[in-house]
Image (tube, rainbow, N blue to C red):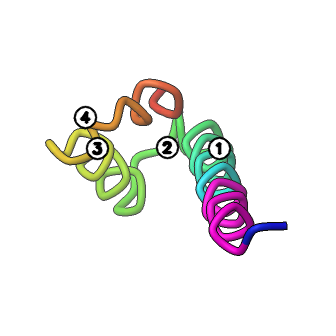
Amino acid sequence: MDESLELLEYIYACADMGMKSTEKLLKILKEKDNKIKKVLESEMNHPAAEQTGYHKVCYL
């Protein structure tokens, strides 16, 4: 397999895992008020995250 393709697949798998983990964490924290939730929400609303569109998938 081409090394570039392997790298892209690895990056995609890591990003996908991160999105799923973030989504699970936000579901767990949904009804709670704590520092982690506030940080996650601010990161999800960061202009760079909004440009990618990924925040729409994860944000509850």
Neighbours of disc 1 within 10 Å: few (<14), some (14-19), many (20+)? few
CB under 8 Å between callouts 1 and 2? yes
Position in image of residue 32 (x %, y %):
49, 43
CA gap, disc 2 and disc 3: 23 Å
Q: Please report whichever mark, 4 or 2, sits nearer to the chain's N-terminal start.
A: 2
Three-letter amino acid code of the residue under disc 4: Glu
Three-letter amino acid code of the residue under disc 2: Lys
Q: Which mark is residue 32?
A: 2
| Residue at which label 1 appears | 28
| Residue at which label 3 appears | 49
Q: Please report whichever mark, 1 or 3, sits nearer to the chain's N-terminal start.
A: 1
Position in image of residue 49 (x %, y %):
28, 44
Image position of 23 with respect to 1: above or below: above
Magenta stretch, main secondary structure, is helix
CA gap, disc 1 and disc 2: 8 Å
Given residues 17 and 5, the one toward you in this image is 5
Is 55 displayed left or right of 28 in the figure?
left
Q: Secondary structure at mark 3?
A: helix
